[in-house]
Image (cartoon, grey):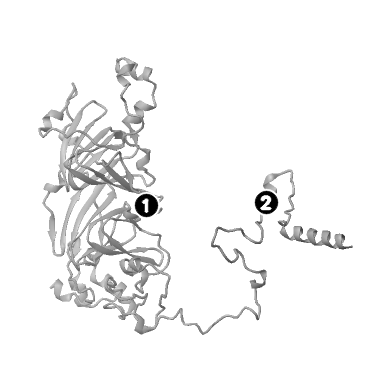
Amino acid sequence: MFYRLLATQVLFAVTLATPIAIERRQSASASDSPAATVVPTATAVGPPGASGYLRGSTDLGGFSSSNPVDTTADASVVSPDQYELAPGQDADKDLGLFLDLSTVENPQPIRGSTDAPTDPGPRNIALDRENSDAFAPPGTDAGTVPNGKWPLGLSANRHGLGSAGWARQQNIDALPIATAMAGVDMRLSPNAYREMHWHKANEWSLILNGSVRLNSMNEAGETFVDDLQAGDVWFFPAGIPHSIQASEAGVEFLLVFDSGDFSEDGTNLLSETFERNSKAVLAKDLRVDTSAFDKIPDGELYIFDGTPFPKNISTDNITGPAGVIPQSSTYSYHLSQQAAYEVPGGSVKIIDPVSFPIASNFAAGLFVIKPGAMRELHWHTTSDEWNYIISGQGRLTVYSAPASSRTFDFQAGDVGYVPVPASHYLENTGTEDLVYLEVLQAPAYNDISVAQWLGLTPKRVVKDHLGFSDDTLNRLPKIKPYILPGNTNLTQTNFTSESE
């Protein structure tokens, strides 16, 4: 009897220690049967120092008087003595004043009323401060507008060989709305190359800092070489091979491509051209012995260190019977030497096929907006707008029919995108100049000025639509302003004195 009892106890103990068996069923079609779920033992075997259980009791599911909820807890309440408001934050929300949250203690998503909802967290306060118009939107924001902002600082930085440089990109993977254009920010260390290559897409570039030497050749065998500096532009048509080399000062430049799904990783490279063809074929093509290819690179060069280019550019001016690319088809434009069009509130330089014919469908405006000033309310007639903030900060509201608008805040290094024909503006919300680039896919730079449109419409018609007073009607401009002046007091609401 004793041994029978002992055997029963042992069997019971073993049963408790044995994992629950999982019923496994087979089916003629694997797609008709979910994969079997393997449940670990109830008591986890953890590392030294582990305690507790991975799972709770099933008794915690659903209502039970033994699972009380503390409804008196105040952890979700942010009282007025725990935060402060920015200037203008308690103003009528439909005024849409810019809220400078940069120095505000514990900023809250409040517009126009101190009893607006608060945010106890979790949160990223740095992002809230940088994006106050997303955190506490103007009362006029409504509906659904796709995201139109991408900070290139959030893009993966692809490094070249050694310390030769890097590149980061924005395309539809990062900004899905940007279907017509994509951008790349590239840095080359002193004397480094962006290796000889070509693209499926057209390439338009603005140099941000430093200087560079370009080399290229077209289908006719005409050659091109030029030195460019910050503020200058180049353009290489799709399929045209070229190389880019930094000067001893290094260079950083912005590349814009006329395809939203462009990827810098999909570039056609000289190094890979030689790596992906047999040496016998290469020897036959170049009329040499196969030993000539013993030192070709193993893998792509992409961005790599080079020997300094000669000071005398004529040394690099290699020409064949076809000669050089004529001035009318040149791949470079010295925009840094172009005088800006100055207006109250800032300046603008326009570069489009009228002055740079080879870039037949790229039109751009390089704008400087003074603190408190604003790129006027406008829209483009035939093209989306791709923009890039070079320095400063600003905000932009996109109106998209029907009944939708959304305001974005931008800082240096951000890409913005506005689909045609959505109206928008860009206001300088900082204390330094806002410098930014607008790029269009158009044979000439174009926009419709809202203010000029009203000024060139019969006053009776405008009054019937908007109910303007005669004084307001008389202030409407007949000439496109481009930029409107302002000041750093962003709570100002009366601008009549500045238009007199």
Question: How crowded is the residue under tag 1: few (<14 C-alpha within 10 Å), some, or many (20+)?
Answer: many
Which type of secondary structure does the marked residue at label 2 adopt? loop
Which residue is under mark 2?
34
Q: In this view, does 333 lie above or below 68?
A: above
Q: Can residue 113 be seen in this view?
A: no
Residue 342 appears in which quarter of the rendering? bottom left
Image spot of residue 128 (x, y percent): 35, 68
| Nearest to the observer: residue 98 or residue 312 | 312
- Residue in the picture at 17% in, 28% down: 324
Label 1 sits on what residue type? Ala
| Nearest to the observer: residue 265 or residue 387 | 265
Residue 284 appears in which quarter of the rendering? top left
Viewed as shown, does residue 237 lie left or right of 474? Answer: right
Image spot of residue 145 (x, y percent): 40, 62
| Nearest to the observer: residue 6 or residue 391 | 6
Mark 2 and mark 1 lie on one chain; the one further toward the N terminus is: 2
Residue 470 appears in which quarter of the rendering? bottom left
Question: How crowded is the residue under tag 2: few (<14 C-alpha within 10 Å), some, or many (20+)?
Answer: few
| Quadrant location of the N terminus in the rendered image | bottom right
- Residue in the picture at 50% in, 82% down: 73
Distance, label 2 to label 1, CA atoms, is 39 Å
Which type of secondary structure does the marked residue at label 1 adopt? loop
- Residue in the picture at 35% in, 64% down: 399
Which residue is under mark 1?
178
Q: In this view, does 226 lie above or below 142?
A: above
Viewed as shown, does residue 341 lie left or right of 378? Answer: left
Image spot of residue 193 (x, y percent): 24, 37
